[in-house]
């Protein structure tokens, strides 16, 4: 569900805070008994949240942050997001025992109650063309199924997700699991990477997003190297 994709794409410091709340609340005795959360699932969540939060806390003093520290944090974050993506639906969104208050107390986004005229309209898959530019940048052109760069009528913006392959990491099977993204309501779309990422491999994919924040299907993933 798109809500899960969006809320788990937040900034690292916010994710660290939210995941800490999710793990703490989910492990409380009353919640475990009432929602039926399995000890093994709580342990799986804690085992990835703890190192991610520890790595993120080391990033507060920007003057001492190194590339290795960033890579460690990013790798830990990706693991935490992967677990949270299945933990939240299993024990909160798809669990009849969980209330709306439980969802909020666990630092998760509530289900949207907003309605607009285009809600429910099918979101088409776009076609993405990328061009490498100097200065570790990429220029992206996004077109609809008939070749128009203008967004379809029910679309608010374009989401571009990307994954930089660092030591010890592999590209997720689906672009929805890429932790980093940029949103743009119009062209041109330029993705700029840090200079330290030059030479690394990157995977990029895009989708349309409607007024409810629902992501459409991702286009074919493109992998290339950062110049």
Image: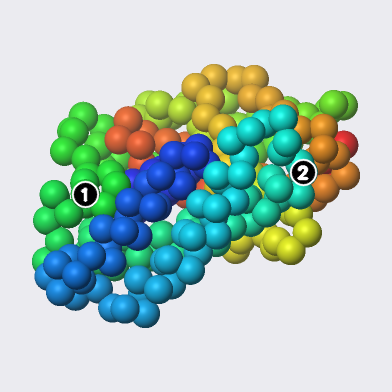
Q: Residue at x 26, y 52 (%)?
A: 106
Q: Residue at x 33, y 51 (%)?
A: 21
Q: Residue at x 59, y 57 (%)?
A: 76
When asked about the image quadrant of residue 41, the answer is bottom left
Dot 1 falls on a residue whose secondary structure is helix
Q: Is residue 169 above or below residue 60?
A: below
Residue position for label 2: 67
- In the rendered structure, the answer to whether residue 47 lies left or right of residue 201 reads left
- In the rendered structure, the answer to whether residue 162 lies left or right of residue 114 reads right
Q: Position of residue 220 (x, y in %)?
A: 63, 51
Can residue 3 be seen from the camera position used here? yes
Comparing 176 with 34, the one in front is 34
Q: Position of residue 60 (x, y in %)?
A: 59, 35
Q: Is residue 216 above or below residue 42?
A: above
Residue position for label 1: 105
Q: Position of residue 14 (x, y in %)?
A: 44, 39
| Spatial separation of the CA atoms under disc 2 and disc 1 | 34 Å
Q: Position of residue 135 (x, y in %)?
A: 85, 26
Q: Quadrant of the C terminus?
A: top right
Comparing 54 with 226, the one in front is 54
Comparing 120 with 179, the one in front is 179
User: Which label number is shown at residue 15?
Assistant: none
Comparing 187 with 22, the one in front is 22
């Amino acid at each position: 569900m798109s809500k899960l994709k969006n809320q788990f794409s937040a900034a690292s410091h916010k994710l660290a805070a939210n995941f800490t709340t999710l793990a703490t609340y989910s492990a409380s005795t009353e919640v475990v008994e009432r929602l039926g959360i399995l000890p093994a699932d709580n342990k799986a969540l804690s085992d990835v949240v703890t190192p991610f939060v520890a790595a993120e806390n080391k990033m507060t003093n920007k003057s001492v942050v190194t590339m290795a520290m960033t890579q460690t944090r990013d790798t830990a974050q990706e693991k935490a997001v992967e677990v949270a993506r299945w933990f939240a639906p299993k024990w909160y969104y798809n669990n009849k025992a969980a209330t709306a208050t439980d969802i909020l107390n666990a630092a998760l986004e509530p289900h949207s109650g907003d309605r607009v005229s285009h809600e429910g309209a099918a979101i088409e898959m776009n076609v993405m063309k990328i061009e490498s530019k100097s200065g570790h940048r990429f220029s992206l052109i996004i077109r609809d199924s008939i070749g128009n760069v203008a967004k379809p009528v029910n679309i608010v913006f374009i989401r571009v997700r990307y994954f930089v392959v660092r030591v010890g990491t592999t590209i997720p099977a689906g672009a929805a699991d890429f932790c980093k993204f940029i949103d743009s309501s119009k062209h041109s779309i330029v993705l700029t990477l840090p200079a330290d990422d030059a030479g690394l491999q990157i995977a990029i994919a895009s989708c349309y997003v409607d007024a409810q924040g629902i992501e459409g299907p991702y286009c074919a993933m493109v992998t290339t190297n950062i110049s």
